[in-house]
Amino acid sequence: MRKILLLMALVASMSWAGFFIESNETKTEAPREIPTFFYGGSVDAGYYLRSVDVGINLAGEFRIAKHHSLALSATGLFVGGVYQAGLDYRFFFGGSMMEFSMDDFVRLSVSGVFVENFKEMDVSPMISVGYGRDFVPMAKANFLVRLEISLGYMFGDGIVDDDEDKLINYETNLLAHFNIGVMFF
């Protein structure tokens, strides 16, 4: 009887022996797929007419391929009454967002700009180019943070400083933007 109990204890200990030994193998997870649709917004600082104007930007973006995306966006700079809506194309070239948690891009945008000049609403087309970076702050996050800087040129009527008290009123067709925002997927 003792031999049977000893044999059972020996067999049980052998079956549990590997349970506490750690394996040296590292398990690597495959990177997540790049989502096809993003939506979100950003805080926008626009520089024109020698001053900074703050506003918001809302966008919906569709990733058409690994390195290409199209987006519809709308921006409002509130103090100067400058509003813009347009189509953005982004080419992603630096990294892989889901693999390395970051991706650099260049942006080309065509938009319409609505400006309040002398109590009237003027509409002008604008082309802008920009550079930015998307990064995922945490490995399992369902959002990304986007930083972007861009420069745009308005064709047609520009933005006019309509202050009657000034001796010189400025007009510009160039707008510079800096955005920091969050895009969800």
Image: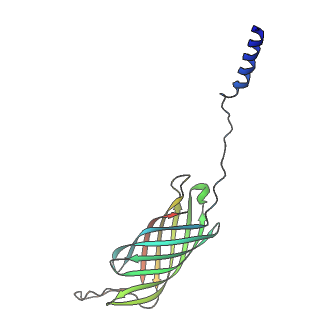
Residue 152, percent from left and from top: 47, 79
Q: Is residue 24 left or right of residue 182?
A: right
> Residue at position x 61%, y 60% from top?
96
- Of residues 167 and 145, the one nearer the viewer is 145
Residue 164, percent from left and from top: 24, 89
Q: Quadrant of residue 24?
A: top right
- Of residues 170 and 26, the one nearer the viewer is 26
> Residue at position x 66%, y 46% from top?
28
Q: Residue furthest toward the left?
A: 165
> Residue at position x 72%, y 21% from top?
12
Q: Is residue 115 above or below residue 32?
A: below
Q: Is residue 52 left or right of residue 143?
A: left
Q: Is residue 170 above or below residue 47?
A: below
**Colour scheme in use:** rainbow
Residue 39, percent from left and from top: 52, 68
Residue 14, percent from left and from top: 73, 22
Quarter of the rendering occupied by the N terminus: top right
> Residue at position x 31%, y 85% from top?
161
Q: Is residue 40 left or right of residue 29?
A: left
